[in-house]
Image: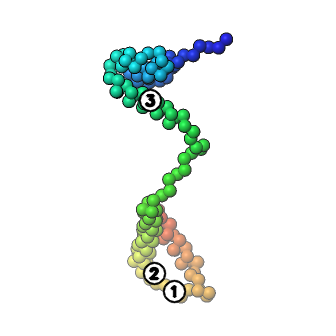
Amino acid sequence: MARPPKGPDLVDTIEGSDFARERLRAVLETVAGQITIKEACARLGIGEARFHVLRRQVLETAMADLAPKPIGRPAAPSPSPETTRVAELEAQVAELSLELEASRVREELALALPGRGQKKAPAQGGHPSRAARRRAERAQRKAERKRR
């Protein structure tokens, strides 16, 4: 034996305010032919024109919600040229700030250690000495720590 249809009584199972529930029940009862539009308007305290607008809104919303939708997450919007340019400039500013800080550290080291800041001739092959590489690495790490 099949269950009898609940029709507009299904509104009682949906979460929402009593105000919204009563309006939806009235719309569904008129669609189901259980009450007339005049009866619904009297119960809701609105005019017929407003009721027709309300019923149309309910039906359009239901139709839109029941339309098939693409599967999966929506694609991320492509960045605008302005957004891309801003990101490029921010990256450039960060890089230049790091270079500036490294330069300041090198200057500070040269002032603190006057005799040692002079460049020596590179070792054979044109590569800097191991000590020079270590100093440059330490200066760069110190600049990175200050930047954070």
Residue type at numbered disc 3: Val
**Contact, mark 3 vs mark 2 (Cβ under 8 Å):** no
Reading the image, the residue beneath label 3 is 58
**Residue 40, how many percent across, how many down?**
39, 18
Up the image or down, 6 lies above or below 146; here it is above
Alpha carbon of mark 3 to alpha carbon of mark 1: how far?
A: 83 Å
Alpha carbon of mark 3 to alpha carbon of mark 2: how far?
A: 79 Å
| Residue 146 in sight | no
Alpha carbon of mark 2 to alpha carbon of mark 1: how far?
A: 9 Å
Up the image or down, 15 lies above or below 96; here it is above
Looking at the image, is mark 3 or mark 1 earlier in the sequence? 3
Q: Nearer the viewer, mark 3 or mark 1?
A: 3
- Front-lying residue, 55 or 18: 55
| Residue 71 in sight | yes
- Front-lying residue, 4 or 124: 4
Q: What is the secondary structure assignment of the residue under circle 1?
A: loop
Q: Say which mark, if any, is on residue 117.
A: 2
**Residue 7, how many percent across, how many down?**
52, 18
Residue type at numbered disc 1: Lys
Looking at the image, is mark 3 or mark 2 earlier in the sequence? 3
Residue type at numbered disc 2: Gly
Reading the image, the residue beneath label 1 is 120
**Residue 64, how many percent across, how many down?**
50, 36
